[in-house]
Image: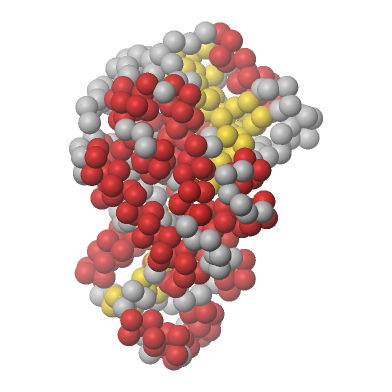
Amino acid sequence: MGTVELLAMLGESPVVLIHGPRQCGKTTLAKQVAATHGYRYFTLDDAAVETAIFADAVGFVADLPEHAIIDEVQRAPKLLLAIKAVVDRDRRPGRLLLTGSSNLLLLPTLADSLAGRMAILRLHPLAQSEIERTKPSFLDDLFSASFPMQPATRLGAALAQRIAAGGYPEAIKRSATRRRRWYRDYVQSLMQRDVQEFARISALDVMPKLLAAAAAQTAKLVNISDLAAPFSLSRTTIRDYVGVLERVFLIEQLSPWHSNRLSRLIKTPKLHLGDTGLACALLGLDAASLWSDRSIFGALLETFVYQELKRHADARDDDIRFSHFRDKDGNEIDLILERGHRLAAVEVKASSTISPTDFRTLHRFREVVGERFAGAALLYDGEISVSVGHGVFAVPFSRLWQNASTTSSRHGPLI
């Protein structure tokens, strides 16, 4: 995601927050704006800045230049209240650009303090389309039910390479061995820095182990009892720790889809790691071992698809919401996407072959939602996009990062 979207937000809102996990490019993006548009840069990683804010947050904000960047704002939550007071006196757009490595939206009192005053840009690790420098059309094709019947190359083990590499810029440029070491150091630094600063964690050494346990549960229904089993801690404590991991963007909980037309729906969220490269490193998997273990490959492939589509959606102007579907009879759909009144569905199959039964739940979903149905895709490792009728398609995985005019894909290592 480039500076264009960010500058558009700065042209409309007094405050813009870029938030996302550490090392996903927030500071780089902010400094690009600083270098070209006259913003002064301040960071709470600077001890002098941090001391000044904690001593007098209101005075610090009042003395800021007309256009300023404050990096790592999550380290001083009371700063947001001071910003609110200053912005209420002068609501000119583009006053402040903030970055944060913690999800401030999970703290209602802080989020509410800047409601209507702050635009939010969610930054992720790189999508495959960003790595490949393509403009994907998957979401548009999905909601218009119009995937062109065009050939693609089966990815095979190259798909496992993409999953294992992940999307962190500093990780993907390293060799597989050095990448795993980078991810381990990344987690350790995050625990000692952000987690220890803002959360009262009585057993900090548990957090990396809990994150690894979550990686093993990715794409499964959240089960706090299973996550708590290896630790001598209560389920309540583990639930709180899961919330901390969610707050620093390491994991996500995908809400269940619900409808008054269907009964017996499972109302438990699904757990997804924030990045599959990080998940593989936590599980000790490289591309070869991931490819050979089909059970964990299928789970990480589902997380890979979810994170790719989330990254595409967050780069768009329209609002696309994600959920999952599962009922007590075992019927499930990996992803339900909602744009306005329209609904689309995506199912993930870790195979190069498909059969009519693979589409049964997608067709059932189409019948249930009626006129709200926009389209559905079953993603598979095949060689062509084909319609199976009524707006339901089989689509190769490579179409996630290709657009309709792309005729080939790079299938070797990403580094």
The foreground one among 377 and 307 is 307
In the orientation shown, which residue stands out farthest toward the front?
232
For the point 22% across and 68% down, which residue is it?
A: 36
Let me know if residue 120 appears in the view: no
Q: How is the image coloured?
A: secondary structure
Seen in the picture, residue 32 relative to 180 is either above or below; the reply is below
Picture quarter containing residue 68?
Answer: bottom left
Q: Residue at x 48, y 24 (%)?
A: 295
Q: Nearer the viewer, residue 59 or 375?
A: 59
In depth, the one of 133 and 316 nearer the eye is: 133
Q: What x and y, as percent, mark residue 286?
A: 32, 33
Q: Quadrant of residue 222?
A: top right
Query: Relative to residue 224, is residue 32 drawn left or right?
Result: left
Spot the residue most to the top: 355
Residue 293 at what x, y percent from top left? 41, 23
Whether 308 is drawn above or below 153: the answer is below
Q: Examine the rendered structure and indicate whether residue 359 appears above or below residue 375.
A: above
Return the x and y of residue 28 as percentages of the image width and height.
Answer: 27, 61
Residue 112 image offset from top left, x and y in percent = 60, 69
Can residue 204 be seen at all in this image of the molecule? yes
- Relative to residue 403, is residue 84 drawn left or right? right
Query: Residue 127: which quarter of the image?
Result: top left
Quadrant assignment for the C terminus: top left
Residue sitting at x 43%, y 60%? 191
